Image (cartoon, rainbow, N blue to C red):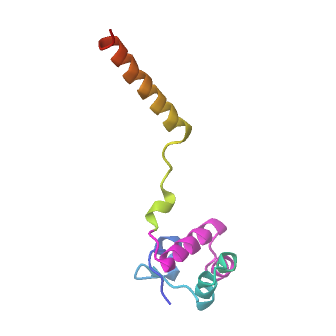
Amino acid sequence: MRAAGCAHLLPEADVDNRNPTFSDEVLAAVDGGRKIEAIKRLREETGLDLKDAKQAIDALARERRGEPGATANMPEEGGARGALKLVVLIVAVLAVYFYFFAP
């Protein structure tokens, strides 16, 4: 079985036409929701370290569920810094309003 989109995570020997080959055991574990088992199997089969194996399995799971993978690594916007920027903007707008337009 082949799974596309994870080729950059596997060693060169396991990559065929930019599509890595996962064993049936790994695919069955991913499809069954047993990610830890899938990671262990992939590490045994390829020699990947834990981080790379987890990334490969997560990408494979997203792909098999039909989810896009691009949003997984995007940083979150906002938080306390975003709230502070909003408060500063509101204060600036009010200051300009009261300076120029208030009687």
Nearest the viewer among 51 and 11 is 51
Residue 54 sits inside the magenta stretch = yes
> Does residue 26 appear to the left or right of 3 in the view shown?
right
At x 56%, y 37%, the residue is 80
Q: Position of residue 57 (x, y in %)?
A: 58, 74
18 over 90 or under it: above or below: below
Number of on-image labels: 0
Residue 24: quarter of image: bottom right
Span colored in magenta? 39-68
Work out which residue is located at the far left of the displayed protein and give it: 101
Q: Position of residue 47 (x, y in %)?
A: 64, 76
At x 63%, y 89%, the residue is 25
* Res 96 visible: yes
At x 44%, y 69%, the residue is 68
Predominant secondary structure, magenta span: helix
> Does residue 77 appear to the left or right of 102 in the view shown?
right
Work out which residue is located at the far top of the displayed protein and give it: 103
Nearest the viewer among 94 and 54 is 94
Nearest the viewer among 46 and 26 is 26
59 over 29 or under it: above or below: above
